[in-house]
Amino acid sequence: MPVEEGLVAGTFPGEGPARRIFRNETLLVLALSLGASGVSALISFIGSVTRPGGLKDQAATMNSSAAPGRPWLDLAWQLFGIASALVPVALVLHLLTRERASGRDLGFDLRRPWSDLGRGAVVAAVVGSVGIAFYLGARGLGFNLTVVPEALPAVWWKYPVLVLSAAQNAVLEEVIVVGYLLRRLGQLGWSPMAALVAGSVLRGSYHLYQGIGGFFGNLAMGVLFVLLYRRWGRVGPLVVAHSFLDIGAFVGFALLAGRVDWLPTG
């Protein structure tokens, strides 16, 4: 099969140049993004479980200061981190053009803004309420670190950066782990069940730095998001849902930490 034919046709019944290209491409994209994050989270988890004391007595901090005491430099680092984290998404969208495809084929576009917004809000409300209960239970049982969603200084750009960070997480994860990965695994001949398991385990893996609860909670979220993507054919609602979830976690923690008794703060 000629390489160009395989790249456009999209399925590869046997081994060949196009199949190898797509397989290697997928591995490289993951190695540059969330696959590497999964390995990093595993190493972090090993460090946590081998450290004296229980998991709940340790903290996993997100969105921390990159230049304490230097707010403008800190802001520059924060924006740089958000922008650079989205480069793999730009790469994926570029790679899709070889198949004469685009983000629109993944449902990553603005064709249905209100539908995506409504569906995403409902999913976020359900997942968020269950997720908070699961996290508190897992931490109480000693299966999870104390997650500190933000530790930024009290500066004017704090909340805008938290919102941008939440949106970046959502775009990166849903475009790559759901839209792109499921497309590639299907083209490479994986069964729908195998692809669902692979994507869900990957999502759980890069949250392992939070503990066992973080792994299984996000694995379950991965299963749900794959099923919803297959039903709707769009990552748009999932990006919205994930954005709302992370905004709620980041901004909610910033507003409530130290003000309510039920929220662990590290």
Image (spheres, rainbow, N blue to C red):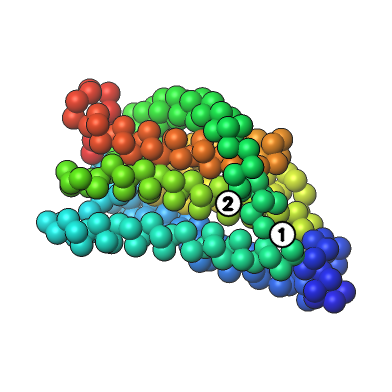
Give left or right: position of 175 versus 193: left
Give left or right: position of 136 versus 194: left
Q: Which residue is under mark 1?
A: 101
The image position of residue 104, as x and y in percent, is 67, 51
The image position of residue 181, as x and y in percent, is 64, 55
Identify the residue at image location x=30%, y=57%: 78
Q: What residue type is labelled 1?
A: Ala
- Whether residue 232 is visible, yes or no, is yes
Element class at badge 2: helix
Element class at badge 1: loop
Whether 186 is drawn above or below 112: the answer is below
- Camera-side residue: 98 or 12? 98
Quarter occupied by residue 37: bottom left
Q: Which residue is under mark 2?
A: 175
Whether 150 is drawn above or below 101: the answer is above
Q: Which amino acid does label 2 sit on?
A: Val
